[in-house]
Image (cartoon, rainbow, N blue to C red):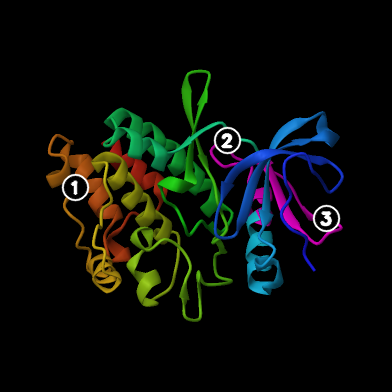
Amino acid sequence: MVAPLPKPGELVAGRYFVVGKLAAGGMGLVLAARDEAEGGRPVALKLLHPELARDPEMVRRFRREGAVLRSLDHPSIVRMYDIGGDDRGRLFTVMELLEGETLLARIEREGPLALELVLTLARGVGAALDAVHGHGVLHGDLKPANVFLVDEGGALQVKLVDFGTSKVHGLERLTRTGEVVGTPIFMAPELLTGDGSIDARIDVYAFGVLLYEALAGAPAFTERNPGKLLFQIVMGQAVPLAERRATLPPHVVAAVARAMSPKKDTRFESALALVAALEGR
């Protein structure tokens, strides 16, 4: 039987002293903690929810995220320190503790972001995706909530987080029978229809939708009816970005539209190609 999630003041696995709660999600809990075996280094301790720890698929997905992050060493990807479990049956991963805010929080607070800021975060996300794809991995759930903005000495540092729905290219799909794994408005049409093979262009698509939201200050698709929403996504019926923000340079609008193409063969082949187009190169 898996023990309840730890509370502040508790020591996990004999070394991680829980300080407080950072976030809660569908898969579990993220806590601020200190690694007493590393001189009290601040860390983020992510634990799988006890109920989900009984589901082999959820355990596999949770462990896979840790394994993926440990294989990646890049300044724009959250650093993974440890993967393990304690003697009470609780599974956890240990990551660097990020101080800042998500891109989603910034958009919700400020609305449409300055073009120069969007270009800066695009370079960071593009570099992170390039590293991910270079390791044969697809992120699979790129969205503003999974992009963390950190201020490092006055400079913006982007950190890509949450690889819980990632896949090793060629080994497994991002869907389970009867279930779509991911966030629909950021999912490429081929993921929703199951039509065709899946490659790095699913992340390029999500990157385009993310950039749209950062530039427009609003989601690309706003339909509330699930069936109509999926139809809009599959048919590429987003509100044109130029209608939301008429002052954007035409090459920026064109780059975002190409990244969001419902037909993967017309999208950019890579995240870095999208960034180059945004910069007018």
**Of residues 203 and 179, which is closer to you in this image?**
179
| Quarter occupied by the C terminus | top left
Q: Residues within 10 Å of mark 3 (few under 14, many from 20)?
A: few
Residue 267: in sight, yes or no? yes
Q: Residue at x 72, y 53 (%)?
A: 92
Residue named by callout 3: 86
Residue named by callout 2: 75
Marked residue nearer the N-terminal end (2 or 3): 2
Q: Residues within 10 Å of mark 1 (few under 14, many from 20)?
A: some
Q: Residue at x 25, y 57 (%)?
A: 221
Mark nearest the camera among 1 and 2 is 1
Q: Label 1, secondary structure: give it.
A: helix
**Of residues 277 and 206, which is closer to you in this image?**
206
Q: Label 3, secondary structure: give it.
A: loop
Q: Position of residue 165 (x, y in %)?
A: 54, 61
Residue that extends furthest to the bottom in the rendered view of this protein? 177
Q: Which residues are magenta?
A: 66-95
What's the distance in space between the residues labelled 1 and 2, CA to CA? 30 Å
